[in-house]
Image (spheres, rainbow, N blue to C red):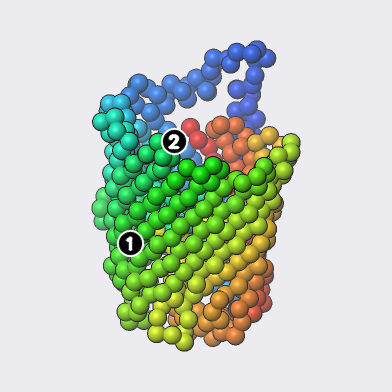
Amino acid sequence: MKLKTLALASLTLATTLFLATAQNSNTASTGTTKAPEPEGYEAFSQKVKKPFDWLSLGADLRVRNEYFKSAVSLSDANPLAEQDVLRIRGRFWATATVVTNLTVNTRVSGEPREWLDPAFTGERAGHTGMEWRYGILDSANVKWDYIMDTPFSFTGGRQDILLGDYYDWWLVADGTPGDGSWTLFMDSLRLGYDAKAIKTKLDLIYINQQSDPGERMPTIGHSGNYTLTDQDEEGVVVYLSNKSIEKTQLDAYFMYKHDDPTRASSFDGESYTTGGKVTGTPFDHWSYSVEGAYQFGQRADRLFANRDVEAYGGKAKLGYGFNDPLKNSISLGFEYLSGDDPSTPEDEMFDVLWGRWPRWSELYIYSFPNETLGRIAQINNLWRIGPMWSISPLKGMTASLGYNALFAPEETPTRTPSAAAGTLFSNDGNFRGHYLQAVLKHQFNKHLCGHLWGEWIWQGDYYTQDEMMTFLRAEVMFTF
């Protein structure tokens, strides 16, 4: 890694430790059994965050230094192979309680970036320096729980929607993959029904997402050269969840998505996805999750005219927690996403819909634009398997280490421009490579956390290169 990146990472960690020490000194225990009254910064924070009984305020600041090599280019020879960027995201939010169970929620977010190497994207593409980007209202909704004392709830407007296993949300998680984990929102209507007597929940969701950040609501600053996603999207999600079987949760869903093209990387067409998931804890220490989906419809893009879609995907995870003082746990994960078979007239590429986010890898999402017409995190034509181990060596600290063997069901990525098809991909191999991840996280106190994150891929015969792809990140996050 470059010297300047090491310096920034060291500065980030030093700042974290300094702030943590200062915070902990202000919140130290008094040695009494009764919790002490808040004082100093904590008293100030609580007063500012709750100025009135009906109003709650909050804010956070996230600083990331990210360095990655060969992830975007797949080759060290490319001038943009090395990327080094400082990302500074700030958010402010407010929740107003109109009456009991009825709230109005808003949040404003912005993320300027300082490119230390020439940027591969954005307004600083090919250049270094500050990219101010824009500010956006990434939450603006009305939420009504237990409508008229019934089991119904409703949220209408701009909101975050995450469906599935915690932090493994598969097909519904991020409506804005174009801004790179800065925001997640979907412009949507969500109606929920909670039938507690039969331990069943039902969600009906309508999504209408615009590619242009300023199309529906004005942005702070110029956003005309940026995108939230690759096309305008409209969708319907029906999601049913039942816990009537002891230690088991059964989910079933149906999703409709219509894509309306707006740029060269757009899809055009409509897809239907039906699937289900089973999760449970059958015995002490053991947990599992199995999910699968089938997808059909029609799809077109700039390389292919309208074709019938016939695709499928699935994932599974088996975990064991030792329940020891160090919270040791191990798991084995598997995932399969079908790729387009060039020998058939159909399109077999599985679309992860609104699941284009770094669910299991921060690194690998950057490589897929090379085989999906420029669509970041459009992961498909993949199957992977590997173990994960995590431990908590200190209070508030977790460390994890994971490995995946990566494969491609189809040797040829059909959505690769012809100029790159022979230079980046061998078209004569199914092994994508060896993937390694190492993460260290620490929650210093309720206001401050940070992490160090590393990922590496040793390329296999699916690629023409025999090089290592690298991703390194240092992060500090302060929550007011």
Residue 317 falls in which quadrant of the image?
Answer: bottom right
Can you say whether 451 is above or below 296 in the image? above
Residue 397 falls in which quadrant of the image?
Answer: top right
The three-letter code of the residue at mark 2 reads: Ala
Quarter placement of the N terminus = bottom right
Residue at figure coordinates x 43%, y 40% from the top left = 199
Residue 327, image x and y in percent?
70, 40
What's the distance in space between the residues labelled 1 and 2, CA to CA? Answer: 35 Å
Residue 55, image x and y in percent?
34, 26
Q: Is residue 412 visible?
A: yes
Q: Which residue is mark 1?
A: 256
Residue at figure coordinates x 51%, y 68% from the top left = 337
Q: Which residue is mark 2?
A: 59
Can you say whether 467 is above or below 289 in the image? below
Camera-nearest label, 1 or 2: 1
Q: Which element carries disc 2, helix, strand or loop?
A: strand
Q: Which element carries disc 1, helix, strand or loop?
A: strand
Residue at figure coordinates x 47%, y 25% from the top left = 45
Residue 338's disc number: none
Can you say whether 455 is above or below 203 in the image? below
